[in-house]
Image (cartoon, rainbow, N blue to C red):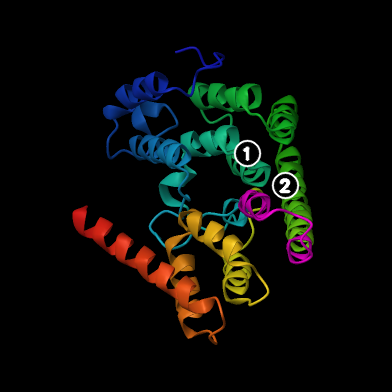
Amino acid sequence: MDWGHSQAWDSKSLDELREKTEVGRGATDADGLGITHEGLKIALGIKEHYKTGTPICVPGETTRILVPEHLLNKNLNLQNLEDPLPLALLATRDPDAPMAIAAAARLSPMGNRTELVSGLFELVGETTKHPLVRQAVSLVTDSAFAPNAINHVRRHATRFIVKTRTQYTAALRQNMSALIEGVIAPRAFVKEFFQLAEAGNLRHDIRRKLVLSLLVSPNIRPSVKFLMLENFHRLSRPVRLEIISGVLRAEPNRHSDVIKEELRWIVEQERQNQEVH
């Protein structure tokens, strides 16, 4: 397998790894490769999440969405997500720089574990679309995986994540003001809302509060609210349920009845889909 090839993350390459690790099913280290069969399954699942646009959850916790802080928390057991392969996939493919650099920081200490993992780590630096990840990989490899270099990457990743989240939160607030003042079009606002929330990895309680405030506010036009509901699936299920509960409990206003009816329809559609599957 050519780890330097730009298409190394395609399905064929992952299938090749699956064949290599098949013999190690149930083993902590498949045939001494430094990766596991379960880790490969997690990586394939992550690829599917990227394909469908659904959120990635903390292993074993279907209602807890993975955020960069989870990857930087050395005391948090991420189970099979600790395998180099899913971490490398996050560092390479995740569209959001904070998540990618956090994954690279988590991967760095194991980057020279075996020849295969070393090649995988180099591939991350060669194929990631995030310059910060590329720089982190270069720093760690150039220092021969020295602990001080790895710690530097972790500290820099932490600062970057905090700074990025602050910037995206400020941008969201500016857009909210622009929406109320009629400066930004509803469709552009909703598009940027989800882009900023996802790129900034905003905490899910903040997303819940923002969306709920939009849906219950009498000052927000119905067209904006319906556009938000068109993108409702982009929120995690626990967040959606909390928003629905909040809207149903909110004080009635001139728009509330039609929004509540739309949410009831969404709930019914989800229930029917669950029954089918």
The numbered mark at residue 104 is 1
Within the magenta stretch, is there residue 182?
A: yes
Is 269 on the left or on the right of 112, as rendered? left
Q: Residue at x 45, y 55 (%)?
A: 233
Within the magenta stretch, is there residue 57?
A: no
Q: Residue at x 50, y 60 (%)?
A: 229
Q: Earlier in the sequence, mark 1 or mark 2?
A: 1
175 or 59: nearer the viewer = 175
Residue 170's image quarter?
bottom right
Expressed as whole percent of the image width and height from the top left, the position of residue 239 reads: 49, 67
103 or 183: nearer the viewer = 183
Q: Residue at x 72, y 56 (%)?
A: 165
Q: Which residue is mark 2?
A: 157
> What element does badge 1 sit on?
helix
Expressed as whole percent of the image width and height from the top left, the position of residue 86 reads: 48, 38
Quick one: label 1, few (<14), some, or many (20+) residues within 10 Å? many
131 or 125: nearer the viewer = 131
Expressed as whole percent of the image width and height from the top left, the position of residue 267 reads: 35, 67
- The part of the chain drawn in magenta is 176-198
The numbered mark at residue 19 is none
**Amino acid type at mark 2:** Ala
Q: Residue at x 58, y 28 (%)?
A: 121
Q: Main secondary structure of the magenta part?
A: helix
Quarter the N terminus occupies: top left
